[in-house]
Structure formats: structure tokens, C-alpha cells
Amino acid sequence: MPSTFTWLDYSERERRKMLDVIHLFDEKGTRDELGIGAVRDSFADLFFPGTTTIQTRAKYFLFVPWIHLDLERRKIPSSQFAAQARWQEVVLIDALAKSDDKEGTIGIDARASLKRLPSNVYWQGMGAWGIRMFPGSQDHYNRSIDAFYVSTLRNLRTDDGDTADGHVARNWHAAIPPMSKDFPGIATFSLTNEEAQYLRERIWSRVPHSLLAFLVGRGILTEPVEFPWEHSQYGDFPLHIKEQLEHARNFSEAIHGAALLYNLMLAEKAAAVELTEDYRNQLEEWAVRTNERKTIFISWDRQKFWSIVESSGQRVAHPTKLFINSWLDIAINSAKGETITDKDQVRRLIHERERALKNNLARLDNQRALELWTGAAGSAQLNYRWPVTQRIVSDILKGLAKEVADA
């Protein structure tokens, strides 16, 4: 019987997080196999609010409002609104596929059969950045359009018949830059200076203390790096961001050993000789890197770490905390030179964690589940959505640089 997800009384945010998780099932090495996603997402939300792992380019934060504002302008009724929006998003896919810069085009392969449209991928982020003013879900927005049209006719008027200030019903931010007359038939990911300034202003206005706000405000175009703490401007980051990044880096590097050990155990269980050797080598390299930072790991203020994690509003379940704290103790022991790869109690911790999360579907216990293992299950080191954010920031900075070029 195939697995299914039943939507109960989840919030829109939780529903979208679940959709992101489902999407990640197909991405090698990125899955949350050991159930530490709440900590990962906490730091990602602190650093890069409004982003998700499946966003691609900055201009979608404008493409989506433009499509919906055009439909509102033409008074498309609720009964047709979702279908019309979908059609325009498919037209947009075709337009981007014909452009000089196709990278990051959502749905470039699926086209009209695309299941999850860009509007769905960016809905939460547009709300976080204050681009979307409508407070509810995308489905609720589509269904409420008729009522919205009625409400705009009831706005308070001045004696001259103009709409009174402060009483304008809006689903979208008032200062969104205008779209071109050819959109969505002709489109490009390249941001104009006006568009880039607008996105920067929205980020500054809504999430001013984030690393994202620093990067679009004071950041410079640099060569891509693997992790945010490797950024060339790290020394210029505000103190609170550097503190958060230090804790995020410690966690990313320490918990990576658990992911590698889990995959080593799977490789051994599957009698995959080459993979077994590969993961043993990776664990040895992890131990060396951990040892190089042993002074930092040994002095790590874990109470402060948990305080930062909880400050974002993410709830970390007690069993997850117990597992993470147990593993961090192991990582610190490794930093002191203790070899942990073949310790029974360490392997038992990993085994029991998988069993607690997956019950009878745990790969270490279920041969059929093990056969579905592709060779890398959640083996990548945590980067807190940095690859996605790095591209979005680059798009904005390139748009802002056009001001200098034009001058």
C-alpha cells in the first residue's frame, strides 16, 4: 500500500514545510534521516527568513505578484482564478525556457504537468517579506477573490469621490514595481535596478536583523562558497549574526558525523563494500576536522546554543534534544581524540534513533526498506539553505549594480 499524507488541522506554514520535505525525498543527501530538522530550520529561519530549499531565483518574488495583480485588475472571478493563474505560470515557464538565462526555471521539464507551481513555492516567502498582504493560504486567496472585488467597491471615499487613505483593500504590497507589457509571454530572471531596490527594501523592512538583510544591504558579489561562515565578509557581519553562525557551524560540523555513521551502518548492512570504505574514510576526515576545532568544541556553550535555537519559535521535541545532546557529547569526545566509529554504544544511539523515528520502516531493521536506500541518506553537511539564498542574493546584488553601470 503506498504511503499517503493526510492533512488535518495544520497551519499553512506547517503544510508548506511538509511539502518541502516531500520534495526533498528526491534529493540525494539532503533528507532529515535523524530527525534534527527543527534545529536546522531554526537557524535557517534566523539567517534567511522567507527562503525555502526549493526556491531558485529572486525574481519569482515579483513574477508571482505580477500574475495575480493582473488577474485582479481584470476581475477574474474566484471560479476561474486558480486555473487562470496556473495557465499564466505555465506561459511564464515557456518564456523563461526561451531566455538566455534558464537556470532555476521551476518546471522547465514538467511544463504544463507541473504539480507545484512557483506561486506555491514562494507563497510563504512573499508573506515573510511583506510582498503578499493577504494573510491566508493560497487556496483561501483564490476562493476569496469575489469577496475582495466587492470589498474594494465599499472602501470609504473622500468628498471628491477618491478612496480615503488607510482604507484601501490590498492583497499585495502597494509599491511592487510594474511588470512589462509583454509579461508573462516574455520574461527574464535579470532584475532591473528598481526591482532589486524594491526587494532589498522589503527585506530591510521586514527582517532587518537577519543575515539576509546584511547581504543585500552591505554584501558584495563574490565567488560562491559552500557555507555562510566561509563568506569573505564574515568579519563585517554584525556581532549577533556571527554568534549565531558560530553555533550553527558547530552544530553542522558535529552532527555531520552522525549522518556519516548512519550511512556507514547502512552500507555495512547492505554489504556494499565500496560505500563502506567511502563512509569510513569520510568519518576519518570528519574526526580530523573535529579535532582541529577541539578547543572551540570543548568550550562550546550548549545552553546558549539551545537558547538561540528556541528563539526562532521552532519547537524541538524532548527526544530530539536528548539524541542531539548525546551525539554532541560524542562529537566532543571525538575532538579529544577518541575514536567513536566502532563503539557499540555510539552505534546503538544511531540505531535506536532511527527505530524511534521510523518504527518498522527503519532501514537498519527492515531489509525491504534497506533495498530502497540509494547510497546516500541525509549524508550532506547542513548548510541552512545557503545555496538557495546565495543565488537569490546574487540576483539582487547584480540588479543593484546596474545603477553603477548605467551611471
Image (cartoon, rainbow, N blue to C red):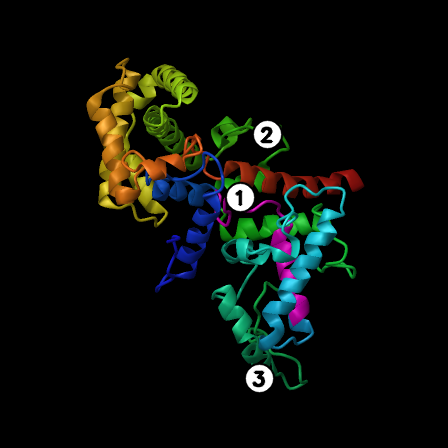
Residue 402 visible in rendering = yes
Chain-order first, disc 3 or disc 2? 3
> What is the secondary structure assignment of the residue under circle 3?
loop
Distance of mark 3 from mark 2, alpha carbons?
Answer: 51 Å
Point out which mark residue 224 bears: 2
> What is the secondary structure assignment of the residue under circle 2?
loop
Q: Which residue is mark 1?
A: 213
Chain-order first, disc 2 or disc 1? 1
Residue at the (56%, 68%) spot, across then down = 171
Distance of mark 2 from mark 1, alpha carbons?
Answer: 18 Å
Chain-order first, disc 3 or disc 1? 3
Residue type of the residue flagged with mark 1: Ala
Residue type of the residue flagged with mark 3: Arg
**Percent coordinates x, y for residue 167 in the rendering:** 55, 76
> What is the secondary structure assignment of the residue under circle 1?
helix
How crowded pointer 2 is (Cα within 10 Å; few <14, some 14-19, many 20+) is rated as some
In the displayed structure, 199 sits above or below 27; it is: below
In the rendered structure, the answer to whether residue 84 lies left or right of residue 258 reads right
Q: Which residue is mark 3?
A: 154
Q: Which residues are magenta?
A: 48-71
Residue 68 visible in rendering = no
Residue at the (63%, 65%) spot, across then down = 85
The answer to the question of whether label 3 and label 2 lie on touching residues, with beta carbons closer than 8 A, is: no
Residue type of the residue flagged with mark 2: Pro
Residue at the left extreme? 345
Please say whether residue 142 is one of the residues in the magenta stretch: no
| Mark toward the viewer: 3 or 2 | 2
The answer to the question of whether label 2 and label 1 lie on touching residues, with beta carbons closer than 8 A, is: no
How crowded pointer 1 is (Cα within 10 Å; few <14, some 14-19, many 20+) is rated as many
